[in-house]
Amino acid sequence: MFSDPDEIPRPEKLLNLELKKKYGIFMQNSYCYKFNIFNRYESPWEGTRICRKKDLKSFNWLRQKIKKKNLNYSFYRIDKEKNICIIKDGGWHFNSLMSPKEISIKLKTFAHTEYSLPKFSSVLNIKKRIANLQDLFGRGHKYKKIKIDESFPIFLRRNKRRYKKFII
């Protein structure tokens, strides 16, 4: 399995997983800033990848080349891996789950240097965008506050008090 630190595969999907194809992609609900700010624009998120050791070329290859869109290519596109299983409701992608100051630092050190500009990276602007449930990058995305319910990780549901600063 390969996963970014902010991508959490749903444990129930792993219990009796029989990978019938070479590769699997866990399709994950995407959240921004807080555990319960839902990002419908990037959901489902192509998150955690999985394969057998014998089929692993490299972790970078797994992340860069195993894509859901490959399944739409014609059979003669032999350069596109299509032996992929899509795992629906496969977990959660918790993006930028940090303080406005930490988000500012992240943007200032981001590979996309255009986002280090103050209109994106100032703590004041970040606080305003979070309060208004808006995208950091001015793409017009309006996020939605949702209730933490049975669809969230059991650990989070049992520890809401512990993580209250990351819940609105």
Image (cartoon, rainbow, N blue to C red):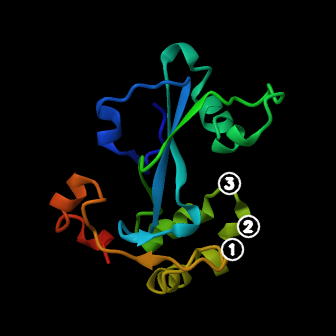
Q: For mark 3, does the 10 Å Cα neighbourhood hold few (<14), some (14 to 19), or many (20 or more) residues?
A: few
Quarter-of-image position of residue 97: bottom left
Q: For mark 1, does the 10 Å Cα neighbourhood hold few (<14), some (14 to 19), or many (20 or more) residues?
A: few
Residue 153 visible in the snapshot: yes
Residue 66, percent across and down? Answer: 63, 35
Q: Which structural element holds mark 3?
A: loop
88 left or right of 73 in image: left
Badges 2 and 1: C-beta atoms under 8 Å apart? yes
Q: Which structural element holds mark 1?
A: loop
151 left or right of 41 in image: left
Residue where numbered disc 1 is placed: 117
Q: Nearer the viewer, residue 7 or 78?
A: 78
Residue where numbered disc 2 is placed: 114
Q: Amino acid at mark 1?
A: Leu
Residue 118 visible in the snapshot: no
Residue 1, percent across and down? Answer: 45, 30
What residue lies at 84% left-to-right and 27% top-to-bottom? 76
Label 3 and label 1: CA atoms lie apart by: 13 Å
Residue where numbered disc 3 is placed: 111
